Amino acid sequence: MTTTDSGKVPNVSFEFFPPQSLEASFRLWESVQVLAPLSPSFVSVTYGAGGSTRELTHEAVGTLIKHYGLNVAAHLTCVDATRAETLEIARSYAEIGVKEIVALRGDPPKGQDRFTPHPEGFSGSVELVAALKELGLFHIRVGAYPDPHPEARDENSDIEMLKRKFDAGADSAITQYFYDIDSFLRFRDRAAAAGITKPIIPGILPIENWDAVKRFSARCGARLPGWMDDAFAKAKRDGVEELLSVSIGTELCSNLVDEGVEDLHFYTLNKPHLTRQICAALGVEPKDSLEAVA
């Protein structure tokens, strides 16, 4: 039973990150087992900061395609690689069955404050998108920022950058997470006014740990409504943090669907259960139990 006033059930997709330990590997594959039966339109697999998990990402992507039959959108960044190396990684993805790329500039490597292009590398996501478009192998997804990116000059900068990425050949965008729906709706309106007609998919981050979300949001520029801090303090006192997280996520997603949003992308952090509960509340039901194929 859906909680949306419109009665519509959204399409969903999920982001995972590649495991760097045996324990993390178990978490990833548990996440896949829990969420893949919801028939996601795609799943994405991240790079670490500075491309630090490049090989692990490739391995995880290959396993998701070969053993689970999922449509995987592999992350690809411009960090610490030449143009030739970056495009070779893209071609290697295509060889294992990847049909979608999430094309990103990427975060600076650990210990660096700012992104510095490789002398023979792409200057940023716009150049990367254009090169991938020329390859003609992928549906290209890019990032978008309803709340201003930390490096944005002003609130129009993020719209200008998104339009440049679409003009370069991107097919759709996935937003940074947000908790104030008006941030997304205003961004969507400004994008439309700028002539952007391609899909902009809201990114949803279920709150596993409120203190961690506050720390990360301070770094990435995501705005947090003032009432949430007090709400989580009271929920922690009463032992109902998970209930509050599911309620916040469900209400946000339900309101987005009622505003005409058809697709939602969940940042799972390889912890699937809050995402699964929110999807259930939205009426997203498992199709079949997932069986990995040998």
Image (cartoon, grey):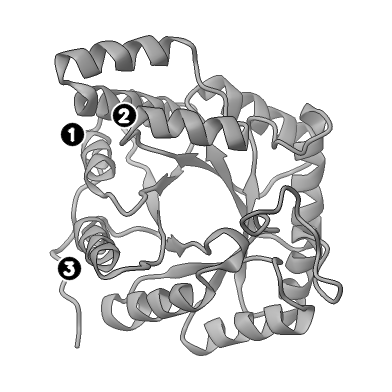
- Looking at the image, residue 123 sits to the left or right of residue 8; the answer is right
Question: Where is residue 33 drawn, in percent x and y?
Answer: 20, 63
Q: Is mark 2 on a helix, strand or loop?
A: helix
In the picture, the disc for residue 141 is none
- Looking at the image, residue 168 sits to the left or right of residue 178; the answer is right
Q: How crowded is mark 1: few (under 14 residues within 10 Å), some or many (20 or more)?
A: few
Query: Can the viewer see residue 273 in this picture?
Result: yes
Q: Name the foreground residue: 284 vs 61.
A: 61
Instruction: Determine contact: label 2, label 1, CB under 8 Å.
Output: no
Q: Mark 1 points at which residue?
A: 1
Question: Where is residue 79 drawn, in percent x and y?
Answer: 69, 66
The three-letter code of the residue at mark 1 reads Met
* Mark 2–mark 3 distance (CA, rounded to whole Å): 24 Å
Q: Which residue lies furthest to the front in this view?
A: 111
Instruction: Determine contact: label 3, label 1, CB under 8 Å.
Output: no
Q: Mark 3 points at which residue?
A: 290
- Looking at the image, residue 3 sits to the left or right of residue 200; the answer is left
Question: Where is residue 22 drawn, in percent x and y?
Answer: 25, 70
Q: Is residue 277 above or below residue 65?
A: above
Which is nearer the N-term, disc 3 or disc 1? 1
Quadrant housing the C terminus: bottom left
* Mark 2–mark 1 distance (CA, rounded to whole Å): 13 Å
Q: Name the foreground residue: 7 vs 104.
A: 104
Q: Is mark 1 on a helix, strand or loop?
A: loop
